[in-house]
Amino acid sequence: MAYINDNFTKIQHRYLFAEIAKRVAAYKEANPAAKIISLGIGDVTQPLAQVVTNAMHKAVDDCASVSSFHGYGPEQGYDFLREKIIANDYAKRGITLSTDEVFISDGAKSDLGNIGDILSVNNTIGVTDPVYPVYVDTNSMAGRQIRYIPCTAENGFTGDIPSEKIDVMYLCFPNNPTGAVITRQGLKQWVDYALKNDTLILYDSAYEAFITDPAIPHSIYEIDGAKECAIEFRSFSKTAGFTGIRCGYTVIPNELNIQSESGNRVALNPVWNRRQCSKFNGASYISQRGAESIFSPEGQQQIHSIIRYYLTNAGIIRQSLQKSGLTVFGGENAPYIWVKTPEHDSWKFFDHLLHHAQVVVTPGAGFGPSGEGYIRITAFGTKESTKEAIERIEGCL
């Protein structure tokens, strides 16, 4: 007899964004002439940079010839990309890494979920709240105990250091959904906590390219001791528009080791490598050549132009809604704007904006208990649609 993993029956039946899609579809069916603008899901709207498409075209041509064809690549990723990542994302910030510490993947979301494969189900999992749903859902599917760390306006949406011991702690800065960033001192407090309590930090820095304040750290490895307690996850999705291309990477330092249930210390880098070799065939050669191209001078110029475009949208949203009397957070070093709703029920306010402004946002309640009373708005629309959407929202407040 086959048995289901009962943990799947205990999680919320419908994924947050699937519920949003269901409500939007129902509204469209009832109102076929509606012109809906979505500022809810964080998908990009600007096309890939020219340097990326050129590189990918060249990679496709490589695969059309016997002499340059690429089939299965290294599960860890091609060195041509790993070396560029180290030189541009880390060495320039004084961080030393070797290529075997960088694992190319099909995106940060995948690795953030899959990392649980190498961690005991007996770990307690800490998540900042509000939280990206993947952290909670994937650990709930495994049957792990979740502890929420409230992130509120009072603590700058960065969370207070726990008084109790947590085994594994997810951190995301710049934060999704609140748009909050963390200071160097604030991040040091989390690293110090992790070192003291033998806690593993899973650091999601998918939005680091949106940081404009030079005082804000881009990587947790800028903090002394972080290599001994943290794994870092990054993505090309928002940085370079790879949402449909799928490419990201995870850094697992060789120094990082944690306790096994049998009592000895185990280095995580070779364990993750073994997992990837068994369950992953590597990101495609074509996507990795595209990712490599963004580190060229032309690539950096082009992707930073796109990032500025989205940050301009964020500024428009932030400033306009503030003038309308709403309390607004984020949107300065992040592509997300976190808005306090006029009424506490965020799903009710979501429905109000959908029905009266024909604008889609994301209700904060979908991100955890502390998200109630807020909505998330993304800056990933076009400038024209962003301006129109905000005008519509202002008109129905």
Image (cartoon, rainbow, N blue to C red):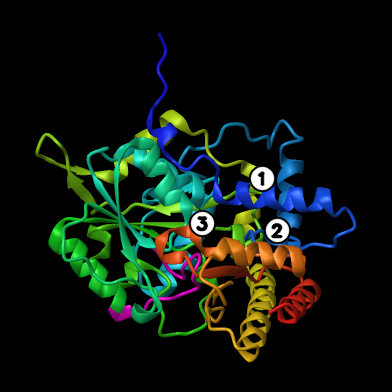
| Residue 303 magenta-highlighted | no
Q: Which residues are magenta?
A: 171-185
Q: Amino acid at mark 1?
A: Ile
Residue in view at x 41 percent, y 60 percent = 369
Residue 397 position in % (x across, y down): 68, 79
Does residue 147 sit above or below 337 in this rendering? above
| Magenta-colored segment: predominant secondary structure | loop
The residue singled out by tag 1 in the image is 286
Label annotation for residue 111: none
The residue singled out by tag 3 in the image is 366
Residue 120 position in % (x across, y down): 25, 38
Residue 165 is at least partly visible in this image: yes
Q: Which type of secondary structure does the marked residue at label 1 adopt? A: helix
Nearest the camera: 101 or 355? 355
Q: Are the residues tagged 1 and 3 within 8 Å (C-beta)?
A: no
Residue 81 position in % (x across, y down): 53, 53
Label annotation for residue 52: 2
Q: Which type of secondary structure does the marked residue at label 3 adopt? A: helix
Name the image quarter holding residue 305. Answer: bottom right
Distance from the alpha carbon under mark 1 to that under mark 3: 35 Å
**First-in-chain label (1 vs 2):** 2
Nearest the camera: 100 or 344? 344
Residue in view at x 66 percent, y 60 percent = 241
Distance from the alpha carbon under mark 2 to that under mark 3: 34 Å
Distance from the alpha carbon under mark 1 to that under mark 2: 10 Å
For residue 125, side relative to residue 265 (left or right): right
Nearest the camera: 66 or 144? 144
Q: Amino acid at mark 3?
A: Gly
**First-in-chain label (2 vs 3):** 2
Q: Are the residues tagged 1 and 2 within 8 Å (C-beta)?
A: no
Does residue 61 sit above or below 214 in this rendering? above
Residue 39 is at least partly visible in this image: no
